[in-house]
Image (spheres, coloured by chain):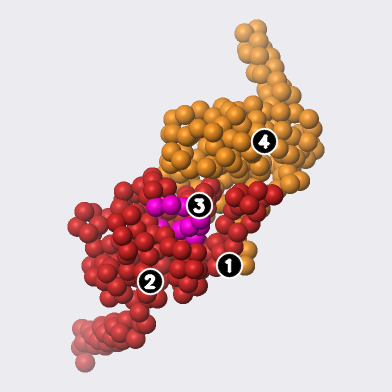
Amino acid sequence: MRLSTLVMALLCSFSVNLYAGDLMISDGWVRAVPPEAPNSAAYMKIANHKDAAVTLVAANSSVAKMVQIHLSKKEGGMMKMEHQKEGVAVPAGGTLELKPGSYHVMLMGLKQPLKEGDQVKVVLKFSDGSEKELMLPVATSDMKSGMSHMDH
Amino acid sequence: MSRFYQILIPIMIAMVTVAAGVQYYLYQEQSAARERPPAPPFTLTSSKGPVSLQQLQGKAVVLYFGYASCPDICPIDLGIVGGALKQLNTEEHDKVQALFITLDPARDNLRRLGEYAAFFHPRLGTLRGTEEQIASVARSYGVIYEKTYTGDDPSVYWVSHSANFFLINPEGQLVATLPRETTPSELSTRIRSVIN
């Protein structure tokens, strides 16, 4: 009896996750920058549990005048940033990783300093009409560089 | 010949060969070092006045070219320089000067540059110059860069740029151009190899 209740509860919670969280966002952070730096970037992982691709089309944040989705890439011997005007697709059942030196949410024209430990609100907009409001911690790349180096 | 010598002689021959090989390699290295051309000279402006590469002879020099509005690339790369410096001790710090050279002198004044660099390491120095001076130093190091405007506002632009670490030994020779995939540990090892 008690076991079946537990199983039911588990199943329920699992299905709730699937339906409510078909887009799961994890490991989000915003880069801490020097006091007067004009720009920063937000990073995260977006897992798509749907059976159809979804595109991250836009983002906004109260801490920046303008927010764009960018890709850093090497081209012609230079590191470039490319505005992803059409957004970035998260494949069905796949994960899009926004990380330093790759895809990122560009926070342009910061209205306030971003110190380590602050929380920043970022809203992501997707092609299926859904929006995700996130509170992301501000961190230095030091705390995260170990992670990014382990990716190599 | 006793069994003992049958084993010993080949070992002796192998050891002599290896030793000769090592000697030859070291000799090659030394002559390569002697033949290395000096790093391209420069004189730029720091918060304490003009700084020339000539002045820095006797120290290892690490150069990185970037800009202070850089939101994704430069913070990663300067984090690597800062990380490498953190791995050196005080005595080693006195034998090395890491420098962040701006490719965006129009927007990066010395105060802003200094603040940006200090965020990564207190010993990371900064240099700027006129557009022409910067262009000439960048060219001499094979650094390419260009502005990308995001819209109609001419004050809003990104700078695409080569992102390498240049390592100059205390003799003033360019020893290595390291890619941005270099880890802080690799960079600190390379710095140590030229100062010790």
- Tint of chain A: orange
Q: Which chain is red?
A: B
Disc nearest the viewer among 3 and 4: 3
The residue tagged 4 is: A59
Q: Which residue is mark 3?
A: B107
Whole-angstrom CA distance, mark 4 to mark 2, is: 43 Å
| Mark 4: amino acid | Ala
Query: What residue sits right under mark 1 in the picture?
Result: A77
CA gap between label 1 and label 4 equals 30 Å
**What type is the residue that disc 1 sits on?**
Gly
Residue A94 drawn at (x, y percent) = 70, 42
> What amino acid is found at the position of numbered circle 3 in the picture?
Arg
* A48, above or below B155, in the image: above
Observer able to see residue B170 = no
Query: Chain for mark 4?
Result: A
The one of A5 and B63 positioned closer to us in this rendering: B63
* Distance of label 3 from label 1 (alpha carbons): 24 Å
State which quarter of the image contains the N terminus of chain B: bottom left
Q: Residue A97 falls in which quadrant of the image?
A: top right
The x, y position of residue A136, in whole percent, is 54, 31
What number is the disc on residue B42?
Answer: 2
Are the residues flagged by discs 3 and 1 from a single subunit? no
User: Looking at the picture, does residue B58 appear above or below residue A127?
Assistant: below
Is B105 part of what is drawn in magenta? yes
Q: Which residues are magenta?
A: B99-110
Q: Nearer the viewer, residue A47 or B33?
A: B33
